[in-house]
Image (cartoon, rainbow, N blue to C red):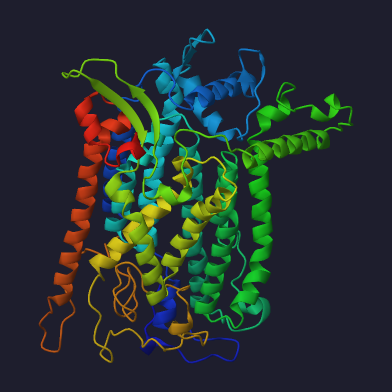
Amino acid sequence: MSVDSASGDKPDDGPDRPTRGIPAIVRRRLAPFDARLDPWSWVATGVVVAIAAILRLVGLGHPPGKIFDEIYYARDAWGLVTKGVEWNYTDNVASYVVHPPLGKWLIGLGQWAFGYADTEQNISVAGHIVTLSPEVGWRIGPAIIGTLSVLIMVRTARRLFHSTVLGCAAGLLVALDGFHLVLSRTALLDIFISFFVFAAFGALVVDRDVRRRRWLNAMEAGLDPSRPGRAGRPTFDWRDGIPWWRLLAFVLMGCAVAVKWSALAFVPVFVLMILWWEAGARRSAGVRRPWRDTLLDESGWLILGGVVLALTYLATWTGWFISDEGYYRHWRADSGLSEPPMIGALLNLAHYHSEAYKFHSTLDTSHTYQSWPWQWLLLGRPVAFYWSTDGACGAASCAAEILLLGTPLLWWSFLPAIVAVAWLGIARRDWRAGTILLALAAGLLPWFYYALDDRTMFNFYTAPAQPFLVLAVVYVLGAIIGPARPPAPAGEPGAPPPAAETDAGGADRAADSGADGAAGPGVGRPGEPPAGLDASGAAPAEGSDVIVTGEKPAADDTGSTSSGGSDRRLVGAVIAGVYVLLVAICFAYFHPVFVGKLLPYAEWSARMWLGSRWI
């Protein structure tokens, strides 16, 4: 991709042929971050993912037996593997369950591969690949998905913040979060919904870059975006004209909804993000009516995405469709109603969903570990998954517990980080801040509504929001570290355009509302170049780290360099590094109660910082 300077602009060839020189501010806003082949970033990613894998896979078979809701999901998963539907082996009939099947299918794959046993049901089956302990069989699926979620976090955060350092910091914070660790080592559904929701978000972030690259390529080829109709749009091509990454995001959201329906709250928010980003790309390119054109151009793809989501969801019910034994599978026929082929099955499934929704909407049974949404980020009532006092620990009394507790230092950073992201997002008009806050609203606010009806809720309902909470913390760390290099003084060569300078579309940066890449983490103040771009608006060399790079500061007229920006970044990097280190130390201290290690009772009690709220 060529980069034409202002001095290299060619004269117009006529009214239908714009110049090929693209203003630096437009190129800056449309040029994507693309350093996929940077080997060092993949080495760093591999190290973080390896740490996550070791923490999640070592000792996975402990504790023995089914803990907490594994007693339901491990059995349901085995029913899906053997009969295609959840099964009640005691009464030898289909089970009535109120969650879609995909998460249980993923648990069941581990049981199929490594074996399953249930002494109460007198079941013992060897694995098809290798036979391990049955606990490994039903926990390996969540452990693998939890590890993959760290991989996706590193790469998504790196693309979002244009920084390998911040991407790895985000992945490491997820890897060292006790909440995420416990869910990754337990056969529950919540790690799956968290994975699919965030994977869909990651696909949308890639889609944003791909679509902007399409506009930039078209403009470099001579497109005039200000022209009306198709003449002002990029030529359609199946390779980049079809939003493949966006369609993948809809597939992933279909999978998320097929784990738990609470993922539906993210669908309208993600659609809003797509429209916001598409309108921002058109505004940057110079389209005269960006929102109108966005709605005209993208509505069809969004409708197709909705169809893809629905078909993906229905596909996860295949076992129920092809079976005659599923719960409510022939409800209409059993009720004396007509049941035409295909349509009848869909109507029966709709009835099943109606009954399941009634269960969810009226669930108000009291539970020892229930909690309210306003307690979750404060760790007000974690859930105990396992408790035992058996065994020798070298003390008179011992205790072993698995507590669904977020690493305290990390989780108690979330609320201040949200406030900081909101403030920085408004001050800098940064699309990344708005994106993070929108996703958090989708993951948290619906539960406040259900709290008004006194619905029974638990802290693991925050699982889909947890990756975005980590992104909020990393956003603030990026702001603390500061820009890659100090900007050149205004009016000197290499200085960024003034805040009121207009782009190709006639919209000034101040009115851009951050949709097109205003300042963000690693940026500093409005008017400085965003992370990933130098003061002239050009992207750094592929794979370079834009936050902590060791770049030389800009030189002044005498040729000397100023160390002020470098010192500021050094101090910021130390602060961010110390924070991550303290989170790691906090995680190590609480690790025994994340994995059920037997401790002297006094040592276990010392970790119950909030007393009875954690017991």
- Residue 518 appears in view: no
Residue at 49% across / 13% down in the picture?
A: 118
Residue 228 image offset from top left, x and y in percent: 66, 82
Q: Give the camera-side residue of 188 and 514.
A: 188
In percent of width and height, residue 520 lies at: 36, 70
Residue shown at 27% from the left, 57% from the top: 165
**Which quadrant is home to the C terminus?**
top left
Instruction: Inspect this view and state whether residue 156 appears.
Output: yes
Quadrant in the picture for the N terminus: bottom left
Give the image quarter of residue 595.
Answer: top left
- Left or right: 241, with 595 as reference point: right
The one nearer the camera, 284 or 106, is: 106
Q: Is residue 158 above or below residue 62?
A: below
Horizontal side of 270 relative to 8 (left or right) equals right
Q: Nearer the viewer, residue 106 or 571?
A: 571
When the figure is inspected, residue 148 is found, relative to residue 341, above or below; the finding is: below
Horizontal and vertical percent for residue 508? Answer: 46, 86
Figure quadrant of residue 347? top right
In the picture as drawn, the residue positioned furthest to the top comes out as 122
| Nearer the observer, 131 or 260 | 260
Q: Residue at x 83, y 30 (%)?
A: 332
